[in-house]
Image (spheres, coloured by chain):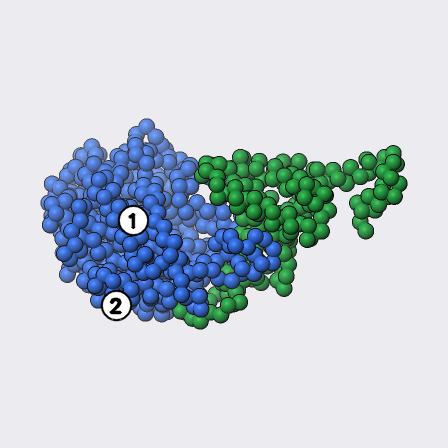
Amino acid sequence: MADNVYDAIVIGSGISGGWAAKELCEKGLKTIMLERGKNIEHVKDYVNANKEAWNFPHHGRRTQEMIKDYPVLKRDYPLNEINLDYWVDDRESPYTEIKRFDWFRGYHVGGRSLMWGRQSYRWSDHDFEANAKEGIGVDWPVRYREIAPWYDHAEKFAGISGNRDGLEILPDGQFMPPMDMTCVEKDFSDRMKKLFNGQRHVIIGRTANITEPLPGRSNCQFRNKCWLGCPFGAYFSTQSSTYPAAMKTGNLTLRPWAIVTKILYDKDKKRATGVEVLDGETNKTYTYYAKVIFLNASTLNSAWILMNSATDIWPDGLGSSSGELGHNIMDHHLGVGAGGTVEGFDDKYYFGRRANGIYIPQFRNVGGDKRDYLRSFGYQGGGSRSGYQRSAEEVAIGADLKDALSEPGPWTLNIGGFGETLPYHDNKITLDKTKKDKWGLNVLAFDVEYKENEKKMRKDMLNDAIEMLTAAGAKNVKGREGDGTLGRGIHEMGSARMGKDPKTSVLNKYNQIWDAPNVFVTDGSFMVSASCVNPSLTYMAFTARAADHAVSELKKGNL
Amino acid sequence: MNRREALSSVALLLGGTIIGAEAFLSGCVNADRKIGSAGIDFSPDDISFLDEVGETIIPATTTPGAKEAKIGEFMHVIVRDCYEQKEQQIFIDGMTKLNEASKKMNGKPFLDSTPEERKKLLIELDKEQKEYTASKKPTDPPHYFRMFKELTIWGYFTSEPGATKALRYVAVPGRYEGCIPYKKGDKAWAT
């Protein structure tokens, strides 16, 4: 076999790319995983993983120079001194904002699996059926029954801790033992159950932090430093989980600095034949060939690659024949919530730093509830004791101030909404041929915004949060209505949706491009709607299912 | 008796008439006047001045104070690298203002004041900043003493001595217990 010929090519090494590589390798395919950025080796390259605030010159705070250098990153928490190296350099990789879109990317091996929030929830048929019931977008070609075994498969390998809550709206999975709630969270949960007749549930977050060891991985040590890279391998990332599993098969080759510029397409066979790669360090061009291609470059970049592919046949790129490629961009809209203080628990505290919170599954437009907008939202939050950051206004300065701030302060309870965004055809990305990145490649232009439905939902997100905290007995409850600019949910979805009809969708139900069935797009691109739960677990499940289908089709000679 | 006090005594003794004594004295007073005059590149005098301001806000008790956490240098680094120019100016002017307020209240520059005088002054300035902060418009600039205080608290509790000695620090907790008893006086967890 020539050194540029493989059974399978996986474009991208983040959550879904890592999964594709693992599954394909374990099924015996010689696979190359192409990553556009640098390598980050597990443990060895987590250079800040054991540092504390005092080991950073600015104790973690962003500097004016960083603000100047990172015009996009500065819009939210990613711009900080602690893990700046894991985020894309805005200067090298600009994009065009016809409308503002906050795009927070990770161009390195592992992608955003290194910095992700790890919250892992299943969809239910309530989500899969929503488009069909309401006549929005297109229907999902898949139902829960079909994907459930793949959720099992993904959870068992990734390691998800969570409680079996028995909720129809949020199906239970193959969980490791749940993390504890704090006293205040338990109290909140009990009160909500009573006050809302079992319609609103406060549960412990289901998170991809393992609470029992897995091969090569230690259980969570409760340092709450996940986003620096975990030396214990205690949270799911490409590095801790899928990459070592794929390497163990002897079938994986990893190629960092490989920017895929296009997928090569044979119009007679109606199959992709390989990919063209630009070396990110040397600017040299390479070609790799394979029978199967998994496209996992992250939702918007996967669309970018398709837009640049097979343009001699389809001017708007491979997968564009339906007119849906690059359209229906979704995210979760956030920034709305409430917080307050809780009395009566001054004799209670906790031990350890839990990198997880509480979760309140969607309850609006669920069951008999009917609102003046479609879909719903969930809340994430937590109840904890405030620390030195609180203002101890009653003490001015001196030893009294020091003593006061050295003790834990009042309990606070905070929740923030994650709202579903509808798939609007006119929320789209296109190629901006007037602007180039560091490598001379055209960049994406964003024309994406949330609309009336989301605006109405945000009112409920605010009022319900205030109502629930107040009902729970919290004091000084304050609502907040922050910036809901799309992108900052960092849950981009929908640029190449799946469907039942090649005329209205880019992919079939197994994530295959209708016009090139040996190309599988299994990152967030395939999403037909957004639900309001964090999406990565769903990408894992669909990726594993697609890989299974790919190998079976390959064996049948259908690819 | 330090050199400053020695000279003052001499001047006092001689009725302040010695030619040149003024220059000697002003040399020392100038060390205070110079506070803030180096702009954003704080002088060693600025750093000691801020160390003492910080130490007055968070003094050494049974645990280290802000000076041991090198709070002056920390404030310098943050003001230099993280503050906007406008904020930097407020901070730098604030050093002079604090010294002026000290002279007005205690009749001498901050560094020449006793710990009690320093404390009395900063309690007054804290009152001033609280009143200002409560009534200011969101677009109004912050009060300089609020900056000093916030930087001291944040810098101290995220410093190694502050986090590991004034607070309870466990590098690798290894487990999580969500609901355990707490008794008044137990320290908060660091980070």
SS under mark 1: helix
Task: Say left or right for B105 vs B27.
Answer: left
Marked residue chain, label 2: A
Q: Is residue B131 above or below residue B19?
A: below
Image: B47 above or below A185: above
Name the amino acid type tagged 1: Leu
User: Which chain did the image draw in green?
Assistant: B
Question: Which residue is labeled 1 in the image?
Answer: A462
Chain identifier matching the blue colour in the rendered picture = A
Mark 1, other Cα within 10 Å: few <14 / some 14–19 / many ≥20: many
When the figure is inspected, residue A416 is found, relative to residue B129, above or below; the finding is below
The answer to which image quadrant residue B37 occupies is top right
Q: Which mark is residue A470?
A: none
Q: Is residue B100 visible?
A: yes
Residue at which label 2 appears: A164
Percent position of residue B88, x then y = 56, 38
Identity of the residue drawn at 22% across and 40% down: A452
Mark 2 closeness class: few <14, some 14–19, many ≥20 residues within 10 Å: some
Task: Name the one closer to the observer, A264 or A548.
Answer: A548
